[in-house]
Amino acid sequence: MKKLVFSTALLLSLGLGACGEEKAAPKEEVPASEQKANEKTVTAETPKWQDEITKLASNSDSAADKFYALEKLLMEYKATDAEVKEFSTYIVDDYKSGSYLSEIDNHERMLSNIFKSYYVEKNSEGALKDFAFDYFQNMKYTYRGVDTVDSEAVKSNEEQMNEAIKKIK
């Protein structure tokens, strides 16, 4: 949201500046090597998938429609091994904190966690794969309103997740 506000303010100031009669000072050239370094810094700070999820989360669609749009991203994105490892640690820690389903109305959080668990499940084996599958199911169905946090399906998945966590090293 802050990026959107900043970008809008920047565009407005540029647009208003173009309306003036004074000539702008010549733009200082930035060496190509410095431009590439700046580009790497920007992309390293915010992965493309996060930008896409932020867009999805902020639109006016229903949670179900946001999820269906996320599915398209899931089919297109290729997670790196490093991302999968990071996602694995995140979803296990999130579950262990006991608050993984505490913000169902927080679209960005829920979509991000669904995204992360999907890639952990698709790129893992054994107990971690099983854990990620059940985490994904609980996130997906509670977010879309199919299940409630205290439903039998969610509780059953949580029992399986607890068993899987005991086996994850």
Image (cartoon, rainbow, N blue to C red):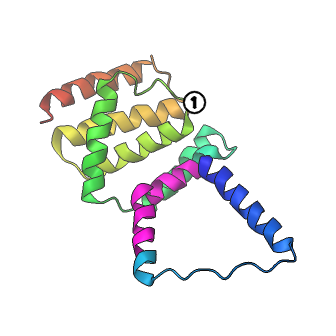
Q: Is residue 114 left or right of residue 68?
A: left
Check if residue 47 falls in the magenta segment: yes
Q: Where residue 115 sits in the image (x, y, percent)? A: 42, 47
In magenta stretch: residue 109: no
Q: Quadrant of residue 67?
A: top right
Q: Amino acid at mark 1?
A: Asp
Residue at point 29%, 60% (across, down)? 80
Magenta span: predominant SS is helix
According to the picture, the residue beneath numbered tag 1 turns out to be: 105
Query: Vertically, is 68 above or below 153?
Result: below
**Residue drawn at 50 percent across, 80 percent down:** 30
Question: In the image, which residues are magenta?
Answer: 36-55
- Nearer to us in this view, 112 or 145: 112
Report the side of 10 relative to 105 (left or right).
right
Give the structural element (helix, strand or loop) at label 1.
Answer: loop
Q: Position of residue 124 (x, y in %)?
A: 22, 49
**Mark 1 nearby-residue class (10 Å; few <14, some 14–19, many ≥20):** few
Q: Relative to 157, is 130 above or below?
A: below
Q: Position of residue 31 (x, y in %)?
A: 45, 82
> Is 47 left or right of 89, judged from the image as shown?
right
